[in-house]
Amino acid sequence: MSTVLESIIEGVREDLAKRQLPINQLKEQISEAAPALDVYGAIATPSMSIIAEVKRSSPSKGDLAAINDPAGLAREYQSAGASVVSVLTEERRFKGSIADFQAVRSTVSLPLLRKDFIVTEYQVMESRAIGADLQLLIVAGLSQSELRDFYQLSHELGMGVLVEIHSDEELERAMAITPQGPRMIGVNARNLKTLEVDPAAFAKLLPQIPDQILRVAESGISLRSEVEAVDELGADAFLVGETLVRASSPAEGIATLLGR
């Protein structure tokens, strides 16, 4: 039986085959794209940073919000003090799209994270072509050689990388991507193979990440007290989607989580 992650990746590959452009055309789009923004600098601030996510659905919770105007939601995030906006582009389980990302890119000046399941070199290049400043690499979904190659290519293209882990073994693999380790590691409290959330993952893994690496807490955060807890564990930023898209006022939601 395949895991949830394996099932998602299978769908991602099928959808990619339908939209894949000739590589020369993709390279032309990259050459025309605006330079990537400094996402590491946006997060490496004295105060806790929030990565606010445009997220319609998830495999664990189903439909969350219609989000008929992703650009408008992103503008609200920006005005409310988000440091980075994350946009889901996976189509089947999260109901995101490249079009959503492009709509947001055209309307906000913040760094953007392309949130997807990157499993091919083409997708790495596609991320830069559509204007991503940061992209996600999930350790559990990639071989070690793919992690290294995609990480290096991302940086060659000017993008930052959020390397996502869920276990001690995945942290070891993340640290082996380069001699110094990656510049940013995200600890996901949700196990993507089972979809179970274990908040103890933050306490177990965040303190193990060396201080020179930016640390992001992902999933399972909905309260100010939970933000304070990951802050004490050494997180530089936290990523939240469900709580904000379900809020009557996403801006008030950000203010509450940031303690403003």
Image (spheres, grey):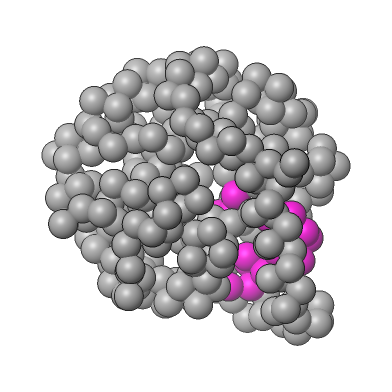
Q: Residue furthest right?
A: 145
Please state which of residues 164 and 185 is positioned toward the viewer in this rendering: 164
Q: Quadrant of the image for the C terminus?
A: top left
- Decide which of 62, 205 is in the foreground and name it: 62
Q: Which residues are magenta?
A: 118-136
Residue 84, horizontal then vertical, whole percent: 40, 53
Q: Could you tell me if residue 104 is visible in this image?
A: yes
- Direction front: furthest residue: 1
Judge left or right: residue 81 versus residue 62.
left
The structure residue drawn at horizontal position 76% and vertical position 35%, both measured from the top left corner, is 177
Q: In this image, 73 relative to 215: left or right?
A: left
The image shows residue 25, relative to residue 8, as above or below, that is below
Image-based side of 8 in relation to 149, left or right: left
- In the image, residue 119 lies in the stretch drawn in magenta: yes
Q: Is residue 122 magenta?
A: yes
* Residue 42 in picture, x, y percent from top left: 42, 47
Name the residue: 47% across, 46% down: 60
